[in-house]
Each structure stands twice: as C-alpha cells, then as structure tokens.
Image: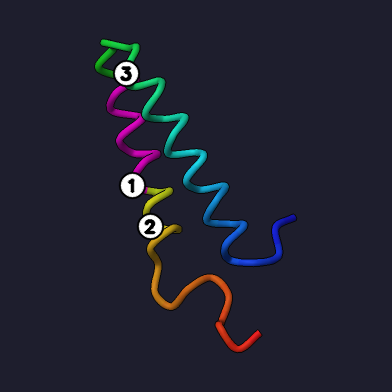
Amino acid sequence: MPTIEKEINCYLFDQLSILERIEAVTDDEKALKQIAIERKQIERKLYQQPPLISSQQ
C-alpha cells in the first residue's frame, strides 16, 4: 500500500496514462463515455484539497 502522497500520485498518473492509451485506439462511444467517468474520478483524487496526506508528516 502506498504510504506517501507522491507515490499515490504516481499511481493515479499511471491510471490516467492507461486511459489515454485505451482512448486513442477505440471508437466505441460507450467505452469513451466510461473512460471520461473514470478520468473524472481519478482527477478528483489527484487534485483533491486538502491533499491525501498532510505535509506535517
């Protein structure tokens, strides 16, 4: 389990990269709609305020 925010962010960026690669090779509207939903959920975690872990640690 990731313990630092930087590591968590790396996982989230990797997930976004995977979605981008899938999106580039599909024309399926249902798949593209689901990709957009997944991207929103990942970005919500990635850019949430306050950060996942406080900076005092």
Image coordinates for residue 10, horizontal then vertical, percent = 55, 50
Q: Is residue 50 left or right of residue 11?
A: left
Q: Is residue 33 left or right of residue 43?
A: left
User: Residue 8 shows which numbered tag?
Assistant: none
Select label 3 or label 2 by which is in front.
3
Q: Which residues are magenta?
A: 31-40
Residue under pointer 1:
40
Q: Earlier in the sequence, mark 3 or mark 1?
A: 3
* Residue nearer the viewer, 24 or 41: 24
- Quote the CA–CA distance across marks 3 and 2: 22 Å
Residue 29 lies in what quarter of the image? top left
User: Residue 44 shows which numbered tag?
Assistant: 2
Q: Earlier in the sequence, mark 3 or mark 2?
A: 3
Q: Residue drawn at (30%, 19%), measured in percent from left and top? A: 30
User: Residue 24 shows which numbered tag?
Assistant: 3
Badge 1 amino acid: Lys
Is disc 2 placed on a helix, strand or loop? helix
Asked whether the residues under the numbered discs 1 and 2 touch, taking CB atoms below 8 Å apart as contact, a structural biologist would say yes
